Image: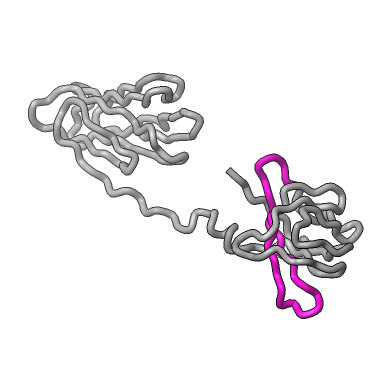
Amino acid sequence: MTTFIFRNNANSTLAGGITNSSTNANLAPGTGIEFPNPSTGQVFAATMIDAATQTLNEIVYVTAIATDTVTMLRGQEGTTPLNWLAGDFFIHQLTAGQMGSFLQSVASPNAPRIVTLSGVFTTNSTDGAIGLQRTTSLAASSTTLPGSAAIGQMITYSDLIGNFQAFPLTVNAPAGMTISNQSFIVVNVNHRKASFTYYGSNFWDVGGVY
């Protein structure tokens, strides 16, 4: 996946003309240092604008920069590769494509739900808080954390009745994952809750039973 990188106030002009098929361009001497320096999998966006009328433009993604020479992908975000002249503007600025690659909104917390039955129950990737309210046919409970959780997702299990000690809850790690380097965690303290956070790289952490 391509990652956009940024630097503030990076602007230059072309040191020489380029055709609409050129993938390299020389910037004004000494200005290359102002721009980000992409590594593998990274790009920065730039917009070329004609100096004469400032009505022509082309967005490019720069994949590499060496001193004052940029290597770029031409005609990005629906723009057309054009011929450019020495002195035309080369500006590192935000584009719609970059903004569209970012998270546009923060999802509201998932609604809590209550589990009333003992035994095995399913924890979904849409869950945020699960309260155990087991009052009949009491027995130990178990569940498995979702294997499709997003990085940073937290799931909390709460003892709403006060019977975790007599009927513990076992929280299992998904296949190929661990919870604080364990395959499962047993929650067995009455009127307590345990929170599990997914950190990525197949690693869940239990944030404490409190």
Q: Name which quarter of the figure residue 204 lies in.
A: top left
Magenta stretch in the rendered image? 38-61
Is 54 rendered above or below residue 5? below
Q: Name which quarter of the figure residue 9 lies in.
A: bottom right
Q: In this rendered view, identify the residue nearer to me: 189 or 64.
A: 64
Residue 97 placement, left or right of 90: left
Residue 128 placement, left or right of 2: left
What number of labels is visible? Answer: 0
**Which quadrant of the rendered structure holds the C terminus?**
top left
- The reply to whether the magenta stretch includes residue 42 is yes
State the residue at coordinates (69%, 40%).
Answer: 40
- The reply to whether residue 131 is in sight is yes
State the residue at coordinates (31%, 26%).
Answer: 171
Q: In this rendered view, identify the residue nearer to me: 76 or 166.
A: 76
Is 24 rendered above or below residue 156? below
Q: In this rendered view, identify the residue nearer to me: 139 or 7.
A: 7
State the residue at coordinates (42%, 32%).
Answer: 207
**Which quadrant of the rendered structure holds the N terminus?**
top right
Residue 13 placement, left or right of 6: right
Where is residue 190 shown, x and y percent of the image?
24, 29
Q: Name which quarter of the figure residue 125 lies in.
A: top left
- The reply to whether residue 210 is in sight is no
